[in-house]
Amino acid sequence: MKVLVTGASGLVGRALIPHLTTGGHDVVRLVRSPSGPGDLVWDPAAGLVKPEEFEGFDAVVHLAGESIASGRWGTEKKRRIKESRVQGTQLLAATLAGLSSPPRVLVSASAIGVYGDRAEEELTEHSSAGSDFLADVCVSWEAATGAAEAQGVRVVHARLGVVLSPKGGALAKMLLPFRLGGGGVIGHGGQYMSWVTLDDVVGAIGHMLAVESIKGPVNVVAPTPVTNREFTKTLGRVLKRPTIVPLPAFAARLALGEMAEALLLASARVRPVGLLESGYLFRHTSLEDGLRHILGKA
């Protein structure tokens, strides 16, 4: 297929592109600042795009959006988080809808933050949305693809869990303190963490592009969510380091504010029902095996 990818410089995009090209697909990046031959340019914030350049693509993978894990969530930061996702997705969907030959499929990133803080409740793609800031962002983000869906494009909302990779994201931030023996349980430690390795994220996206029966929300998480306490012990065991320095909930809130509630203290026990029922075979279903693989600790 000929595939257009936004967010190509992010953690998932940097891994997805070589995965697709190795599989024989022709990949073009849609970026704000071109850095290579063949890049297409857009400016989502300004609503600038060249529709004629979008003709001829079989699929689009939309990953672009402001980072949620950098800086405190003040009013301006929250505005950028939401607008970068909603405005960009609306622009992309409207552009695809106006083409003479739209792509067959649009895989648009979302997140399991759509479910909010749900304690021990087991969550699937049919579960209701939460009521906090991230849930509101995700609901609006997914709704922003409406124009493309109305024109018959098969739209998949890839609800990403906590993506594990030493190259970025949550795990990359944890590695130094854990290696120094400063890792520990966050809060009470009972909150569920629905993780997935980067290998399985790119594998799942490739699966979504190929399997025509997949549409709507799809949870991109491993089938075995763990509590924060379990994750902490497992990472410590893989790194052969003690995990005896807890981060109390009040300290997390003091340091990070609202972001601590959503990213560190909230609980989401999510199941990847859509991927499993469509035949996707996970590379990593055990947290310890996944961590050992990506950290070279086999």
Image: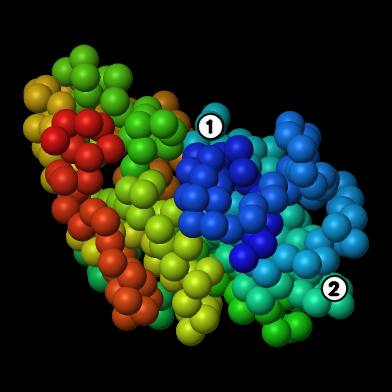
Instruction: Tell me where residue 238 appears, x and y as whole percent.
Output: 13, 32
Scheme by which the image is coloured: rainbow
Read off the residue under disc 1. 70
Q: Is residue 233 left or right of residue 214?
A: left
* Residue 86 in view in this figure: no
Read off the residue under disc 2. 99
Q: Decide which of 229, 152 is in the foreground and name it.
A: 152
Instruction: Tell me where residue 182 appears, x and y as whole percent.
Output: 20, 19
Above or below for 79 versus 275: above
Above or below for 154 versus 178: below
Q: Check disc 2: other Cα within 10 Å, few if <14, some if 14-19, many if 20+.
A: some
Name the secondary structure under disc 2. loop
User: Which residue is drawn at the image coordinates 64% and 52% (left, top)?
Assistant: 27
Q: Is residue 135 left or right of residue 173?
A: right
Q: Check disc 1: other Cα within 10 Å, few if <14, some if 14-19, many if 20+.
A: few
Mark 2 vs 1, N-terminal side: 1
User: Which residue is drawn at the image coordinates 35% and 55% (left, top)?
Assistant: 200
Labels 2 & 1 near each other (Cβ < 8 A):
no
User: Which residue is drawn at the image coordinates 22% and 40% (left, top)?
Assistant: 293
